[in-house]
Image: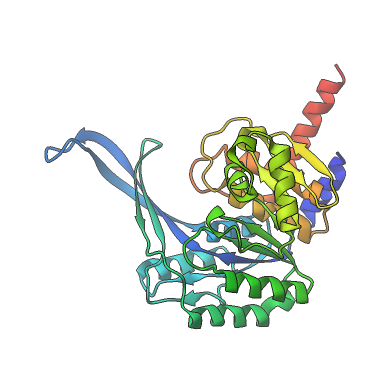
Amino acid sequence: MDVKKLIQTIRDFKGKRVLVIGDVMLDKSIVGDVTRISPEAPVQVVNVQKEEFVPGGAANVANNVASLSGDVYIIGTVGNDEMGATLLEELKKRNMHTDYMIKDSTRPTITKMRIMARGQQLLRVDYEKVHNIDREHEEKIINELKQGIEDIDVIVISDYGKGLLSRNFMAKVTDIAKGNKVYTIVDPKPMHREYYYGCHLLTPNYDEACLMSGLEEEFWEDVMKVGEALVRKYDTDILVTRGEMGMSLFKKDGMVKHIPTKAKEVYDVTGAGDTVVATLAMSLAAGSSLEDAARIANHAAGIVVGKIGTSTVTASELEKDIKKDSEYNGNQNGK
């Protein structure tokens, strides 16, 4: 591993242009303290101290790109409601380009509300109405993409299965990307396994990879069989994220690389996949090879799972972590 090369890639992140398309959400945290049980029911009473708002879903991918010093554009839908206005405000605070966001009055802004006390999640409440966007909104998004594609280095499609993506929509996006020679990464959902033909890279977690592979369940324990089946099925490169087992990269040319995890302590895996695809996009936009991009993304995942809640990673954190890991391995090898 060429550490200097990885560090230079990270330093080249600044200003790289990434477009994120997907199911955007708002993560709302109600943080308080618990000192008693309700007299009305056997439940804890939370004395609210503060409320926090963070971009979630595909918007968390965009947030990670912004945190890595990227120039991020985002396409998705929000409701014509208070939470939609809050989400757009949070995106703008983070210097994201929101001109291509679409307001859809037929459903609310997807909101995940978590009630927290003493560092623990007590309850999660979801506000969402899941159905496919109508043809009018789909055409608006496609037109926005056609207008803005020339300004883009890499596209990330973040599928949370909430209704933005359809087979027809995905075919149009990949055709536009190919026509403009823009690299496309898809963070997939097995329920949409037939949508993803024509992209450059798929990044399923291991459970998703098994479900999408088309293999019988008896073969799911063999990561080689799963990865190779996905490459054959989609005719594209595959990066399987495997939690504490790290990542496995399967390339169309037959190259396979298993990358061990860099996580030291795991506190919360929320949004780790979003961090991975954002870091991959930034690395590839900066001219990295796919293997090196996966190594950098693996470090990013190791950092973010050591944080609580929906979190991001900065370029400086990444550089520091890679240097520290290199020094540690150098010392170990010198023993």
Q: Position of residue 246 (x, y in %)?
A: 68, 36
Q: Position of residue 330 (x, y in %)?
A: 84, 27
Q: Position of residue 22 (x, y in %)?
A: 55, 65
**212 sits left or right of 55 in the view:** right
Q: Residue at x 66, y 33 (%)?
A: 245
How many tags in the picture?
0
Q: Residue furthest left?
A: 40
Q: Residue at x 51, y 45 (%)?
A: 270
**110 sits left or right of 273 in the view:** left
Q: Position of residue 28 (x, y in %)?
A: 40, 54
| Quadrant into which the C terminus falls | top right
Tell me if I can see residue 296 in this picture: no
Tell me if I can see residue 104 in this picture: yes
Q: Residue at x 52, y 34 (%)?
A: 267
- Residue 184 lies, with reference to residue 256, above or below; the image says below
- Residue 39 lies, with reference to residue 58, above or below; the image says above
**149 sits left or right of 47 in the view:** right
User: Where is residue 269, by image quadrant?
Assistant: top right
| Quadrant into which the N terminus falls | top right
Q: Which residue occupies the foreground of this view, 156 or 43?
A: 156
Q: Residue at x 50, y 41 (%)?
A: 308
- Residue 159 lies, with reference to residue 124, above or below; the image says below
User: Where is residue 249, by image quadrant?
Assistant: top right
